[in-house]
Structure formats: C-alpha cells, structure tokens
Image: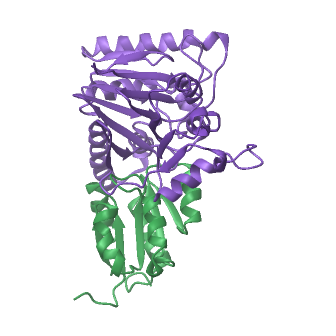
Chain colours: A purple, B green
Amino acid sequence: MSKSYLRFWGVRGSYTAPFQTHLSVGGNTSCVEIRVDDHILLCDAGTGLIPFGNEMMQQKQVRNLLIMLTHYHWDHICGLPFFLPAFIPDWHISIFGPGQSSKDIEEYVSAQMRAPYFPVGTETWLAKIKYLSPPQNHNFNHGPIAVSYQNVHHPGTTYGYRINVHDKTILYISDNECLYLEKSINQQYAEMSIEERELYDNLKTEEYESELNLFRGADILIHDAQYTPQDYQAKRGWGHSCYIDTVNLAIDAEVGELYLYHHDPNYDDQQLEIIHQHCEQIIRERHSTLICHLAREGAIIDLG
Amino acid sequence: MADKSIPIIVVVDDSRSMRAFFERGTAQLNVELMVFESAVKSWTYLEANKPDLLFLNIKMPGKDGLIFLKELRELPLHKETTVIMISSKDYAQDRTVASQLGAVEFVTKPMPIKAITDIILKYIKTDSGN
C-alpha cells in the first residue's frame, strides 16, 4: 500500500520560537517532509530537520533522502549540523540548492560548520553525501517525485519549488516578498513622467501576471506569510510577504489550499490565530473557494 | 554587419516592458541595443562577444542574474566587462554579491528613463553624448 504524505517539521521563519506561548503552532524553523513510500524529500533544513532526523534513527527501512534548500539563510540550514543521519555511514543524502555548480552548494552548506562557528566540519559526516549539479532545464526527479524550481523575490538567489506527487502539485515557497515591485512603482508614481507611467503600468501588469503564474496550478501552496500589515510597513524590503498579499494572490491564482508559513517568531499562537481568522474573512468576502490553513508543526497532509 | 564604432549595449531582462524602457532610454544615443529575455538566450552571443555595457536583471526565469554573472566572469572575455545590475530586488545581500562579482552599478526598478541614459553616458563614449 502506498504511503504518501507531507509533514511539517518546522514552520517558523527567521529564528526558533521555543516559547510556551508559541508551541501550539510550533517553534522550529523551516522544514517540510514529503514522502512517497520510501522516497523522502525534505524542503529546507531548519531546526525542524533535527526531530525529523531523530525519528529517522528509530527506523531501518529508509537510508536515502534528498534535502532541497530554498537558500542558505541560517533559519533554512541550521538543522544540518545536528542532523544525526549525516553522521551514520550507511545513509545516502543528496543535497540541492541555489548555486552555479555542485561545488557551490557544498561550499555554502559547509561554511556554517567551520571553526570558530561550529566544533566539527562536514568532513566528519560519515553518510555518503552527494551535492547535486543544477540541471539545465531546472527540473529533476526524486523517485516518483518530480521537482522544478524558480527564482523568487528574496535576498540573494532563492528558489521556490514546484513538486508533483501523484496527481497533486505542491508549491513550497518559504521566502518570497510578494508584490514588491508593484508597491515600489506605486510609491514613485507621482514623480514619474506620463511616458514612464505608461511603461511602468505595463510592467506592473506583467509582474502581477508573473506572480500569478508562480502560484497557478497549485493544489497545495506553502507560502511565506510572515508579517501583519503593520509590521510589513516597518520591514518592507526584508524579503517576506504580508499575509494579506499572500492570501489575495492565492485567491487570484485559484490555488486549492494555502498553508500560511514562515511565521514570524514574534507572533504567539493567539496572534497567528487572528491572522488566520483574517485570512478566512478575506476569502469569504471575496467569495473564494480557497481553503486556508496555518502551517503547524507536526501537521500531516495525506497525499493519496 | 555591425558598425564596430557604434557602442553595443546588451540587456538581459525577461520583461517586455523593460525592453521598451531601454529603447526609450537609448533613443537619443548613437548605440546599438540588443535585448535578450533570459540568460540562456543571451549565452550564444555573450560567449563570443563583449558588449561595451551589459545590463543584467537579477530575478528572471531560469538562471538568475547573480549566478549568470558568476558564470560570465569565468570566461576570459568577460573578466573586465562593464556590468550594471538592474533589479526590483532592492536588497543589501544582492548589492554585496553583485559588487563582489564586479558589477559597477546597482540600479533598482523603477528608475527614471533618464537614469539609463545617464549611466550609459557615464560608462561609454557616444557621438550623441560626448
């Protein structure tokens, strides 16, 4: 019998939130497991990777997995130094992420484990580690799981992943600042000439269409929804979305289910519930069929 | 055959609107403008030719401008090519990486048309501008 599911191991952005007031939603940083039978794909390697690794140590069936990193900011890689399977000889671990070559990926992953920042380096990993070369067409497969990736709006080169499992399309876009250019154009519109306004109106339309295309076809969208509108005002340009933009774009792109993700560590369970309720209100007011969830640590989605 | 005395400006940007933007920005200049919609599509040309000025967008489908610039710099032909990043991503990290890869300017969208004209005049000599 096929066993296919998605499990959230870490749902926070920026840094861990191990506070009593935050643990209903969860305190670990970005890590999502997608499993089809014995094929395991990890999206990001934040601290959520650590309990995942500990669970893997309790079983003998699987010895092979792929870790796909969206980028190399700490909250997405800091689980790797504590990932127990990497220190066990019979494990095979493939790692992929942004970079010109497999050597780049190795360099970026290894850097955080160099002295004086960590006592042991990746050379102490006993598992067979393979850093994947970037494919020419931005597509690859991991067993029955098909993956493609695109650049998204976040500092440095950052990927959003489109993952096909059976007949479902999952989008994993942990860090992405929606509508950034549109807002920049609106801010400067008054100073523009008529000719520039015409050009930038076209660019806005083009950009919005491109953002919708990123989301289109998603049965499940796991997306950055880090800030309230108030906090976004202060943190615009930090590379994260206001949840209102995320939910509106998901509605416009006719996404099936949205998981609000990469929660700000300053928001406790109660604040996140308020954000979720507001998203539900927006969905009702727009008469959309979008189903919206708060991504919660430990939550499992059956993939059929 | 291209007139070798006319400076060549290459733009790599996926946006159709930005193509129009560069056409307006160079309309009064005696330059040849070549626009490619992706890093991959510009590769055949850039592998064999060094433009006088290269404008690179960062966030594009396929290879992004930062990874592409790293790749270009590995070609002896482009070690010294004058590169200007044009991006909607106004992030310090992108500026730092671009600067480490030898980009001489980092221009954020939206910029006035005149900003493009001024940058071209700053880095190349044209009959119309000098």
Q: Residue at x 41, y 56 (%)?
A: B64
**Viewer can see residue A74:** yes
B15 versus A48 height, above or below:
below
Q: Residue at x 41, y 43 (%)?
A: A152
* Residue A222 in the image, given as x and y percentages of width and height: 39, 27
Q: Residue at x 41, y 63 (%)?
A: B56
Q: Residue at x 62, y 50 (%)?
A: A110
How many dots with numbers? 0
Q: Is residue A87 left or right of residue A158?
A: right
The part of the image, by quadrant, that contains residue A86 is top right
**Closer-to-camera residue (A89/B90):** A89
* Residue B103 in the image, given as x and y percentages of width and height: 52, 67
A291 versus A77 height, above or below:
above
**Viewer can see residue B27:** no
**Furthest-right residue in this view:** A116
Q: Is residue A148 left or right of residue A12?
A: left
**Closer-to-camera residue (A19/B29):** A19
**Closer-to-camera residue (A129/A184):** A129
Q: Is residue A119 left or right of residue A92?
A: right
Q: Quarter of the image containing the N terminus of chain B?
A: bottom left
* Residue A212 in the image, given as x and y percentages of width and height: 28, 36
* Residue A169 in the image, given as x and y percentages of width and height: 27, 30
A215 versus A127 height, above or below:
above
Q: Quarter of the image containing the C terminus of chain B?
A: bottom left
